Amino acid sequence: MPTQPSKELERIPNPKPERDYEIEITTNEFTCVCPRTGQPDFATITIRYVPDQWIVELKSLKLYLWSYRNEGHYHEEVTNTILDDLVRTLEPRRMTVIADFNIRGGLHTVVTARYERTAEGPARLAAD
């Protein structure tokens, strides 16, 4: 497994796929760069999900989040991209990604993006 930033998320088998249970992962070390100003943005990222057959391998998640460090992204875009990539990799029953960005310019931004698998068909993605 690499020790450099990587966009490759890895998954491992869920040890209890027959049970609905929630996994919460939080890091306060997320950084990216504002595409408008070039200034760094710092955030606490919280990922909550109910797995189905797969769970995320944590080191790959750390390296994935680290890969945004020098990239320019708007808060809303990066939050939804993280959700999309995790959903594509893990195929969870439900997932929420919350990005709580540090105050910059007197403004505090929190972006919440949600996914829920529906019984009727394809998954639904929603952003707050």
Image: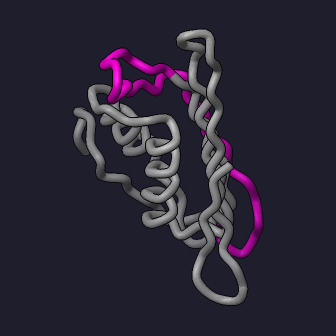
Q: Quadrant of residue 46?
A: top right
Residue 128: horizontal and vertical position, in percent?
68, 49
- The answer to which of 77 and 123 lies nearer the viewer is 77
The residue range painted magenta reads 16-42
Residue 48: horizontal and vertical position, in percent?
67, 48
Q: Which residue is at a point 53% across and 70% down the rendered structure image?
A: 91
- The answer to which of 52 and 93 lies nearer the viewer is 93
Q: Which residue is at a point 72% across and 75% down the rendered structure image?
A: 18
**Residue sitting at the far bottom:** 120
- The answer to which of 73 and 48 lies nearer the viewer is 73
The quadrant of the rendering that contains the N terminus is top left
- The answer to which of 61 and 110 lies nearer the viewer is 110
Residue 35: horizontal and vertical position, in percent?
33, 29
Tell me which colouring the rendered structure shows.
one colour
- On screen, 45 above or below 79? above
Q: Which residue is at a point 43% across and 59% down the rendered structure image?
A: 11
**Residue sitting at the far right:** 20
Residue 12 appears left or right of 60: right
Residue 53: horizontal and vertical position, in percent?
56, 72
Q: Quadrant of residue 44?
A: top right
Q: Which residue is at a point 58% across and 82% down the rendered structure image?
A: 122
Residue 102 appears left or right of 41: right
